[in-house]
Image: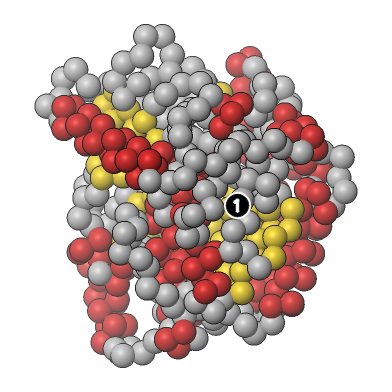
């Protein structure tokens, strides 16, 4: 596997490392722009955004000019993974620093969407608030709500899909979201803060507004296999619509001179399938179209870091310790993730191959899990035909078409590691108090139905 760090634009790894060493020597002993207290953090969660549909990840359509510019001015993680193929367990990991099965029990889908985040876990927002940061959440996803206790630790929680009075989630206008974002920045002023913005597009149904609905060709909100190209056109239109909003979010930070003291992170909870492996949408497999997601980190300008690409694998499990560290807090030692800033401050140590896990209390009604180690990825069950294990060499087979499970000596080791992880996760979860499932509000259920959760 190549070195874990490289420059956008063709500069060599050696040049990058030399540059970083010079910066380190010149700035030795210097803290970030906000001093030892840490900085502010804006985390934009773009629901259902697969990495390979962005230009900065090699896509040949112009879906992401603003994200591409942000990547060129910050740090892009080339091999960043979700921890689950659907939203609730992915956000649970983001907020708790635990893998999904260490938070939620295996349940059928209709029950799983009503399981609350355990109140006894100390969440990311709770720890940041205790550390002196203001905590604000602007959420447009109906499944991530206060009834399910995802608001733990947030001083302010705003459900955008409800505040806007829209008939359905699909018409939550970008201008409305931007206005709420700007209002929050103005209310926060110069205080240190963590602002979590969860956008629901480009989630199905893919209904981008004009002119994005025909920007890449004829589109349709229908999702059958025969509509594959129209699905992709509509999805890409939604990605471009979202990209325009993110560009304006970055402008809002710049207009308020917050870019000197604020980290901007853009990522996703999971990707989306378009029949690459006999499945569409998400929640139904563990292939990379669902599990490989973007992560773009734009540091405060005083950090002096821009145009880096990190190739060593990382995952959502790393975001809690990273955000705590950026906010000036010491991450609890029991967290399994790493502070991603070490990927450029201590690249040799960060490059050490890790075991990264992708599992869910369920995936639709299919029990499955996966593990990534370097260039290898192992899935313990495939969700169609007769369940069987699969091993892929992602360096040689990025599309995951050639199953090496029956031919590679690494299969047994990968299987053993994955089973040990699942057992450990179940043991961690056994220490939590069991919380009753929540009966969701009819409006929330209707919006979840529109998203395809209750088919």
In the depicted structure, whether residue 426 falls above or below residue 131: above
- Residue at 32%, 54% (x, y): give it: 336
Task: For residue 301, say whether it is visible.
Answer: yes
* Number of numbered discs: 1
In the depicted structure, whether residue 270 falls above or below residue 225: below
In the depicted structure, whether residue 25 falls above or below residue 280: below
- Residue at 32%, 83% (x, y): give it: 23
On the picture, is 245 further left or further right than 403?
Answer: right
On the picture, is 277 further left or further right than 455?
Answer: left
- Residue at 74%, 53% (x, y): give it: 159
Percent coordinates x, y for residue 306 in the rendering: 43, 71
Towards the viewer: 389 or 149: 149
Percent coordinates x, y for residue 72 in the rendering: 48, 64
Towards the viewer: 9 or 439: 439
Label 1: element kind: loop
Q: Which quadrant, please, contains the C terminus?
A: top right
Percent coordinates x, y for residue 204 in the rendering: 67, 33
Task: Name the outermost residue toward the top.
Answer: 386
Circle 1 crowding by C-alpha within 10 Å: few under 14, some 14–19, many from 20? many
Give the residue at mark 1: 150
Task: For residue 264, say whether it is visible.
Answer: no
Quarter of image, res 49: top right
- Residue at 71%, 37% (x, y): give it: 440
């Amino acid at each position: 596997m190549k070195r874990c760090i490289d420059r956008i634009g063709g500069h060599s790894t050696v040049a990058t490392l030399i540059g970083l060493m010079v910066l380190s020597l010149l700035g030795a002993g210097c803290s970030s722009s906000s001093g030892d207290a840490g900085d502010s953090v804006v985390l934009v969660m773009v629901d259902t955004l697969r990495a390979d549909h962005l230009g900065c990840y090699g896509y040949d359509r112009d879906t992401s000019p603003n994200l591409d510019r942000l990547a060129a001015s910050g740090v892009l993680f080339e091999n960043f993974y979700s921890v689950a193929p659907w939203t609730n367990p992915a956000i649970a990991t983001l907020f708790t620093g635990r893998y999904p099965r260490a938070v939620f029990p295996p349940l059928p889908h209709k029950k799983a969407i009503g399981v609350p985040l355990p109140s006894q876990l100390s969440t990311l927002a709770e720890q940041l608030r205790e550390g002196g940061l203001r905590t604000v959440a602007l959420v447009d996803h109906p499944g991530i709500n206060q009834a399910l206790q995802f608001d733990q630790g947030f001083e302010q929680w705003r459900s955008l899909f409800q505040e806007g009075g829209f008939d359905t989630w699909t018409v939550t206008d970008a201008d409305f979201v931007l206005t709420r974002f700007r209002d929050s920045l103005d209310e926060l002023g110069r205080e240190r803060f963590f602002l979590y913005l969860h956008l629901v597009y480009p989630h199905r149904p893919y209904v981008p507004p004009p002119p994005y609905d025909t920007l890449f060709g004829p589109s349709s909100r229908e999702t059958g296999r025969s509509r594959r190209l129209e699905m992709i056109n509509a999805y890409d239109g939604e990605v471009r619509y979202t990209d325009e909003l993110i560009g304006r979010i970055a402008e809002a930070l710049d207009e308020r001179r917050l870019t000197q003291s604020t980290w901007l992170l853009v990522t996703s909870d999971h990707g989306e399938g378009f029949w690459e492996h006999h499945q569409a949408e998400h929640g139904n497999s563990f292939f990379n179209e669902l599990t490989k997601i973007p992560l773009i980190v734009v540091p405060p300008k005083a950090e002096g870091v821009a145009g880096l690409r990190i190739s060593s694998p990382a995952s959502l499990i790393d975001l809690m310790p990273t955000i705590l560290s950026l906010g000036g807090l010491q991450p609890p030692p029991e967290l399994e993730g790493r502070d991603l800033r070490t990927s450029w401050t201590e690249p040799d140590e960060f490059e050490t191959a890790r075991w990264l896990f992708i599992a869910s209390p369920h995936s639709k009604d299919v029990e499955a899990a996966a593990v990534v180690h370097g260039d290898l990825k192992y899935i313990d069950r495939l969700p169609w035909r007769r369940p069987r294990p699969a091993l892929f060499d992602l360096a040689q087979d990025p599309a995951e078409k050639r199953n090496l499970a029956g031919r590679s000596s690494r299969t047994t080791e990968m299987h053993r590691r994955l089973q040990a992880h699942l057992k450990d996760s179940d043991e961690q979860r056994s220490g939590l108090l069991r919380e009753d499932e929540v009966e969701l509000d009819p409006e929330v259920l209707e919006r979840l139905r529109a998203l395809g959760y209750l088919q």
